[in-house]
Amino acid sequence: MSKQNNVKIILHVDMNAYFCSVACLLNPVLRGKAFAIGRENSYRGVISSASYEARALGIHSAQSLKEAYDLVPDLIVVHLDYSYYLEYHQKFLKILNEYSKLVEVASIDEAYLDITEMSQTRHPLVIAKEIQMRILKEAGLSCSIGIAPTLFLAKMASDMKKPLGITVLRKRDVQKLLYPLSVSDIYGIGKKTYPSLISNDIKTIADFMNPLNKEKIIRLIGQNTYEYAYSHILGNSSNVVDPNRRSESESISTSQTFDRIINTSIEVLYELRKMTREMVNKLNNSHYFTKTITITLRNVDFKTITRSKSIDYTDDFDTIYDVVVDLVEEHYKDEPLRLLGVGLSNLKEEKDLPKEYNLFTLLDENEKQIEINRIIKEYQKKYGEKALFQAKKKNL
């Protein structure tokens, strides 16, 4: 790996079967068994993740539970509270932050870090191996690491050896290491896109990069997607690890497909209230505030509507749930539903909140109420007791 000043050295650290690994740490009996993360005791919903033993039997993420049970009738399915995944996320992130000030979280189970500076005195492979072993020893998690001069190539490299692999991918190695791979391995090519490429004889990355296939590929996936993938594979993409890149777009969400039909506002709000409480607990545990609240409603004909509303940054349950109620009252038309969901997005840590974040959004509930009462009393004293009053909250 070159140590020239103009060449970045970037690691992509990817936890191996993260959700299943955390489940094994909490319940060691699961180790070595074919199991998946999903809804327990139900044929509804989909698989979130599968252990390597389950994957060997054809189980995979996004697979319906019914299909999974058809393949493996004795498949073990477990569900864990999201807070456990956040807890272990913080554990491995703490280790990464000891190696670089430039750590970019890509998702709950992966991150990029720029080790260019440290690599001036230590070999990148030595650093990567040390990080890998520390995460295994201190957090109990296995990971694969890609080392490359760009984020895209580092991501591609980390996928090449799993579990517990380390792969170096330099620009001059692209043709040797990437070209033989399937087009399905190109990061950013969706699951609905690569089958059409394969069915049209664009089977490998070498086929994709062949200029003779350019026009055909553009017809299949569009010029923008083609140019994005083509340039990124050649190494002509970002080498900037930005710790704040995803701070505006991070989100958490939950949804549930019901065995029964939900067809009244009372039922909808009852279920969404529980989901909102779960989301706010996650928000509070990770010390985040949200700006945008989203509800998802899917009817028995599988028609889905998603509606959102943005407010001042908050981590308060009542404030967030009031928005959920408003969205339901505005958009739910008493039709039978089979799926409900709540999402919180535009998340920020308190230290990163906008400067205009004011008294009312920072004070706790008691302090807020005291301030509100003080303002109301001052206004009533000046204009009369009936001039201003606080509406009572709805009890749902």
Image (cartoon, rainbow, N blue to C red):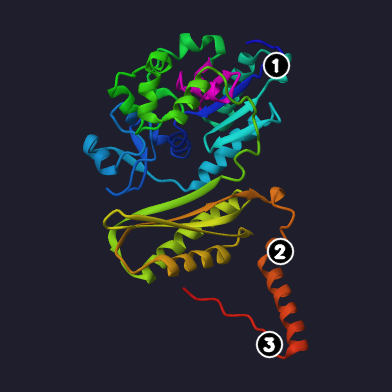
The CA span between labels 2 and 3 is 26 Å
Q: Quadrant of residue 380?
A: bottom right
Disc 1 residue type (three-letter): Asn
- Where is residue 44 shown, x and y percent of the image? 29, 49
Mark 3 crowdedness (10 Å alpha carbons): few <14, some 14-19, many ≥20: few
Image label count? 3
Indicate the secondary structure of the residue bearing disc 1: loop
Q: Which residue is mark 1?
A: 6
The CA span between labels 1 and 3 is 67 Å
332 relative to 238, above or below: below
Q: Is residue 11 left or right of residue 193?
A: right
278 relative to 235, above or below: below
- Where is residue 330 shown, x and y percent of the image? 44, 68
Sequence-wise, the earlier of marks 1 and 3 is: 1
Q: Nearer the viewer, residue 81 or 387?
A: 387
Instruction: Give the label, 2 or 1, closer to the camera.
Output: 1
Give the residue drawn at x 30%, y 18%.
201
Indicate the secondary structure of the residue bearing disc 2: loop
Give the residue drawn at x 63%, y 27%.
113
Disc 2 residue type (three-letter): Leu
Within the magenta stretch, is there residue 156? yes
The quarter of the rendered structure image containing the N terminus is top right
120 relative to 189, above or below: above
**Res. 387 mark:** 3
Q: Quadrant of residue 261?
A: bottom left
Query: Which segment did they paint magenta?
Result: 142-167
